[in-house]
Image (cartoon, helix red, strand yellow):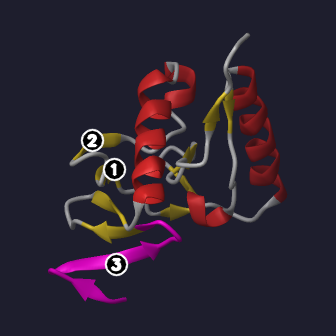
Amino acid sequence: MKKINKMKVIGVGKWRVAYDLGNRRVIKVAKSKNGRSSNKQEVIVYKSAPSRIKKHLGTITTYGYGYHILVMKKYKRMFPRSKKYKRKLIALRRKFMRNGIIPHDLNSNNIRLKNDGRIVFIDYGNFQKHRKK
């Protein structure tokens, strides 16, 4: 992978680039206004999520510069493509929906496992908070 300013690029999306900071942290840098919106949405979802949901969201350690950057804990364990984990993912999606969060863009590139085997979303910039009427 390419290195910029001594940081290894570990992911490139439409609106953001993710770099490995080398200290078990990842920095997501916005490439555009939409990237800043994605970073902001991740912060909003993370801060407002109840603990039963937050434990399935990548831990945000800091953010700033008008949401231009967001630093998150790095999760290495890939999401298994097994029936067992697909069922767990479906159940987790329902849990998010019951808690007012609509998870979009659920694909294996955006999902990892914590060391304890718990599913964690590492890209939730497209998640939406459902507004109660």
View extreme (left): residue: 5
Task: Decide: few, some or many residues near mark 2? Use Cα within 10 Å; few <14, some 14-19, many ≥20.
Answer: few
Asked if marks 1 and 2 touch (Cβ < 8 Å), the reply is yes
Q: Mark 2 points at which residue?
A: 61
State how many labels appear: 3
Question: How much space separates mark 1 and mark 2, taking CA atoms?
Answer: 5 Å
Looking at this view, is 103 or 91 the one in front? 103
Task: Decide: few, some or many residues near mark 3? Use Cα within 10 Å; few <14, some 14-19, many ≥20.
Answer: some
On screen, residue 4 above or below 52: below
Please give the name of the residue rendered at 53% of the width and 71% of the height, measured from the top-left corner.
Answer: 14
Amino acid at pointer 2? Thr
Q: Mark 1 points at which residue?
A: 72
Task: Decide: few, some or many residues near mark 1? Use Cα within 10 Å; few <14, some 14-19, many ≥20.
Answer: many
Secondary structure at badge 2 equals strand
- The x and y percentages for residue 121 are 55, 48
Please give the name of the residue rendered at 15% of the width and 80% of the height, measured from the top-left corner.
Answer: 5
Question: How much space separates mark 2 and mark 3, taking CA atoms?
Answer: 19 Å
Q: Name the residue under label 3.
A: 9
Going from N to C along the chain, the mark reached first, 1 or 2, is 2
- The x and y percentages for residue 103 are 68, 42
Is residue 52 shown in magenta?
A: no
Q: In this view, does 12 lie to the left or right of 26?
A: right
Going from N to C along the chain, the mark reached first, 3 or 1, is 3
Amino acid at pointer 1? Met
Q: What stretch is highlighted in magenta?
A: 1-16
On screen, residue 67 above or below 30: above
Asked if marks 3 and 1 touch (Cβ < 8 Å), the reply is no
- The x and y percentages for residue 73 are 33, 50
Is residue 11 shown in magenta?
A: yes
